[in-house]
Image: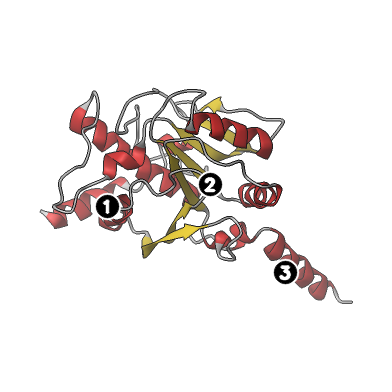
Amino acid sequence: MSHKKNILIVLIAFMFICPAVSGQQRDHFVFSQLKYKGGNWNMYPSSFAEIINLLMTTTSVEPELRRNDILLTDKDLFISPFMWMVGDREFDEFSGKDIKILRQYLLCGGLLVIDDAVGHRNYGFDKSVRKLIRKLFPEKKFEKITEGHAIFRSYYLMRGLGGRKMVSRHLEGIDVGRRTAVVYCRNNLLGAWARDRFGNWLYECIPGGEMQRLEAMKLTMNLIMYSLTGTYKKDLVHQPYIDKKLRMRR
């Protein structure tokens, strides 16, 4: 067998083993939201549209105009390196098969953002999340994400956090190699985006008000950009593009 054929076989095999990596596109984005059993996985169905609107307004990313609601066993799990998981109560334990698939997704380049809508440590949703992480990576535990992490520089230069309710001043994460594969926020980011059918904010952001909501939005954008660009982003090369787009809206 020729050397070229050997290389081709290796590349094809890698695509099947790590489809999340092979499917990433820097200028294309699919908002995937994880469906799970026994909990409240779809708390803020309107938040997605707000996120996509800001993403289209302030970045050059081309998002799909739909939310990809997905089970871990769905065949299109690996179409996006980004997946959101939100909840406010304890949920059913993931099966062994689901754990295996989710671990593969994370090892192959996927980012899982976990959004706690309540924030009570070691109770309800938080308790289930920590149990899930122990099954996913028995040798690891959540660590504080430091202020110098690429997440805080991937789009906006951030010095703090936001959310519907300020429970924690830091994010937690699980690293896989040199990359953070799981990000856990206990401040309810999606809740800060939710509007009613008249366009009014559904929830007040406590205690910081609208500035706290703005920080939640900036963090959401940064998480999306981090999933698309990884750890290389260390500066503000996108800022002139943001300013130009915002001037066009006025």
Q: Residue at x 62, y 28 (%)?
A: 141
Mark 3 lies on residue: 12
Q: Are marks 2 and 3 in contact (CB under 8 Å)?
A: no
Q: Is residue 155 visible?
A: no
* Residue 239 vertical placement versus 49 (above, below): above
Residue 129 image position (x, y, % from top left):
54, 34
Q: In the displayed structure, does residue 23 sit left or right of residue 45?
A: right
**Amino acid at the residue labelled 2:** Leu
Helix, strand or loop status at disc 3: helix
Between marks 2 and 3, how big is the CA–CA gap? Answer: 23 Å
**Residue 50 - label:** 1
**Amino acid at the residue labelled 3:** Ile
Q: In the displayed structure, does residue 7 sit left or right of residue 222?
A: right
Residue sticking out furthest to the left: 250
**Disc 3 crowd, CA 10 A, few/some/many (<14, 14-19, 20+):** few
**Amino acid at the residue labelled 1:** Glu
Quadrant in the rendering for residue 166: top left
